[in-house]
Image (cartoon, helix red, strand yellow):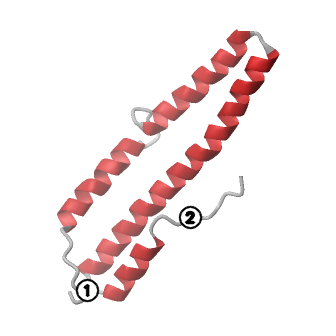
Amino acid sequence: MSGGWSIDTAGVGAILHSVMDQMGDGGGSALDGHLTTLTEETANAAMASMSGPVGAELYGFLEHIGGLSEEMVERTGSAVEGCAQAVDAYLVGDAEMAAEAQSNAGKFEDPDL
């Protein structure tokens, strides 16, 4: 492949797989599960506090981290997808497509939170 690229595709695949394992698949044993637990336990703490101001602040905290968490997951997914597309393009010898996929990695549509 021209352009001086030398990609260890198996290594990239292993890293992408590791990142997705750490993000989780909805089963709850990775970051996805920790975020769910954090949400549930913070809501429980708000109710258990039996204090309007404390509960309001805890729910405000949940709203804040909810948006940040959603953005983090979106950006990570976009970065993984962009990286995978760049490597696929590299494997078929399309340097221009690989460069475009690489430049788009990490971009996502703003959910307008």
Residue located beneath label 2 in the image: 108
Q: Quadrant of residue 98?
A: bottom left
Residue at (22% x, 90% y) in the render:
2
Local SS, label 2: loop
Left or right placement of residue 70 versus residue 33 in this view: right
Return the residue nearer the eye: 64 or 24: 64
Pointer 2 local density, CA inside 10 Å: few below 14, some 14–19, many at least 20? some
Amino acid carrying mark 1 in the image:
Gly
Residue located beneath label 1 in the image: 93
The answer to whether 26 is drawn above or below residue 41 in the figure is below
The answer to whether 15 is drawn above or below residue 31 in the figure is below
Q: Quadrant of residue 40?
A: top right
Left or right placement of residue 4 versus residue 104 in this view: left
Q: Quadrant of residue 69?
A: top right
Residue at (46% x, 55% y) in the render:
76
In this rendering, the label closer to the viewer, 1 or 2: 2
Please report whichever mark, 1 or 2, sits nearer to the chain's N-terminal start: 1
